[in-house]
Amino acid sequence: MNGIPILTLLTAVPVVGAIIAFFSGRHARGVALITALVALAGSLCVWMQLPANGSIGLVERFAWAPSLGIEYHLGVDALGALMLVLSAIVTLMAVDASHRVPHQPGLYFGLVLLLEAGLFGSFTALNFYHWFLFWEVSLIPAFFLIKLWGGPRRGPAATQFFIYTMAGSAALLVAFLAVFFATGSMDFIHLTAMAQSGALARDVTMRLGPVMPWLAIGVLAGFAVKVPIIPFHTWLPSAYSEAPSPVTMLLTGAMSKMGVYGLLRIALPIFGPQIAAMRTPLLVLAVITVVMGAWAAAAQKDLKRIFAYSSVNHLGYCLLAIFALAVPATSTMAHNNQAAALNGVILQMFNHGLTAAALFWFVAIIQLRSGGLRGLEDFGGLRKAAPVLAGLMGIAMFSSLGLPGLNSFVSEFLIFRGVFPLSWEAASFSVLGLLITAAVLLTIIQKVFSGPLPEKWASFPDLHHSERLALAPVIGLMILLGLVPELILHSVNPTVVNLLAHWRF
């Protein structure tokens, strides 16, 4: 380990902030805001120090328990660093959106910051043991945030969330214990090199028999729950709808990306040939996630449940691209298609996290002004009473829709640009998800903001100055990335090239 251990310090910042917030009482929100701002500044510093060739940089490594294959091994490329920036942004948004915590604010904001620490650790760890600790740690504050501050059915929702995610974690743990038994290593970089040379499959088969496909299924199951992939999604609607809206912002904006990140950092590099062998059924699941996620959103009447299912749909595009590119590149054109799809996935992870968190923030604002109402049929004509709210939320919804000129258009375009040549059938069916999403979001605009204004909402307050100031950078970033996506792609593309060069299908 050379120089300042910036990744360790970055992970420690929210932990220290959480400890202070626990004992800060009514000042806990101020402590959390300062901590989140420091964490954002630190994550941006990490982004600025990435290696230009797309390799993993800022490495911190020393022996922890060598006989057990455990090392303290940290490092990031553009994939990990972008997720750090996203986690920091979404945490700051969630803290800012938490204006009224009904009880125990110190505990609430402390748990939010601990969740941020779990995210940071998951996106920087390169040893399974270390990574798994943070993967599990992130579940605990999320569970209590839902359980203690959620809606009327918060108990069952929190329990379902915890059981599902723990089941996925158990599948991951069993798979990697088997890999460790066969190879003596838990290091992602070393295991990726073994997979690339074929040594991993050879050693596992020699020690355990022909179980590599089953280990790959276990790893996929663990990440399938977290993303989630249909049919492993049934925990999500209740968790998202019952959690306080700021917590939902964290669940959809950052935690769901842990699953997609795991597919890119762990599943494809280490189990690439096995995933390639399952490519067709996995593509079917991805298409179902895209289309049925949008269709389920169309059937909802609760704004939070609509956006919850919409999140399933949008992350389905990432799954579509990931599984589509899991095929050997036999030409330069095929390699370029894979690169386009993977660039789209990484950019979509960031764009969806930003946009989805903003949408749930707007729902929180509407609930705060309406006494907790969030039904699709509860409003109407709000554009007349709150034009700024309607305008800014409209931009966020058009971003979610993938309107050209906004951030999500670029990532979705890259995904379909890469996927069509790799699997035109899957891409063609997935276009239905775009059409249904358009209908869903336009319906929200029509029923909530358009039409006659009911008399009871004639005095519905518009956004006040502090809310406009807080939302302006988020909306501005959606527009900026829609017009200048190179701000992110310039650093992401070298990492994409580096990742594809080390994956074996």
Image (tube, grey):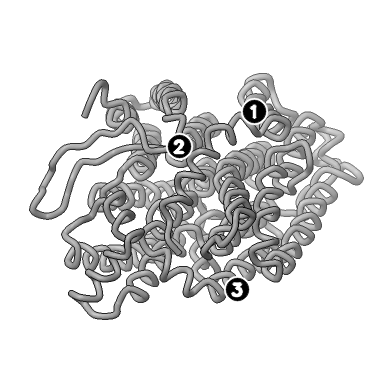
Determine the CA span between mark 1 and mark 2. Answer: 32 Å
Residue at 30% in and 77% down = 211
The residue where tag 3 is placed is 284
Q: In this picture, is 307 found above or below 116?
A: below
Indicate which disc, 2 or 3, sits on the residue closer to the N terminus.
Answer: 2
Q: In this picture, is 391 found above or below 249?
A: above
Residue at 68% in and 19% down = 465
Horizontal side of residue 70 vs 411, given as left or right? left
Residue 316 shows which numbered tag? Answer: none
Crowding at dot 2, Cα within 10 Å, few <14 / some 14-19 / many 20+, comes out as many
Horizontal side of residue 146 vs 345, given as left or right? left
Kind of residue at disc 3: Val
Q: In this picture, is 273 found above or below 185?
A: below
Indicate which disc, 3 or 1, sits on the residue closer to the N terminus.
Answer: 3
- Could you say which is closer to the camera, residue 276 or residue 297? 276
Quarter of the image for residue 184 reads bottom left
Q: Position of residue 159 (x, y in %)?
A: 39, 62
Crowding at dot 1, Cα within 10 Å, few <14 / some 14-19 / many 20+, comes out as many
Q: In this picture, is 160 found above or below 397?
A: below
Kind of residue at disc 2: Gly
Determine the CA span between mark 3 and mark 1. Answer: 38 Å
- Quarter of the image with the N terminus is top left
Nearest-to-viewer mark from 2 and 3: 2
Residue at 25% in and 21% down = 3
Nearest-to-viewer mark from 3 and 1: 3
The residue where tag 1 is placed is 471
Question: Quick check: can you spot residue 311?
Answer: no
Indicate which disc, 1 or 2, sits on the residue closer to the N terminus.
Answer: 2
Determine the CA span between mark 2 and mark 3. Answer: 31 Å
The residue where tag 2 is placed is 54
Quarter of the image for residue 411 reads top right
Q: Position of residue 461 (x, y in %)?
A: 74, 30
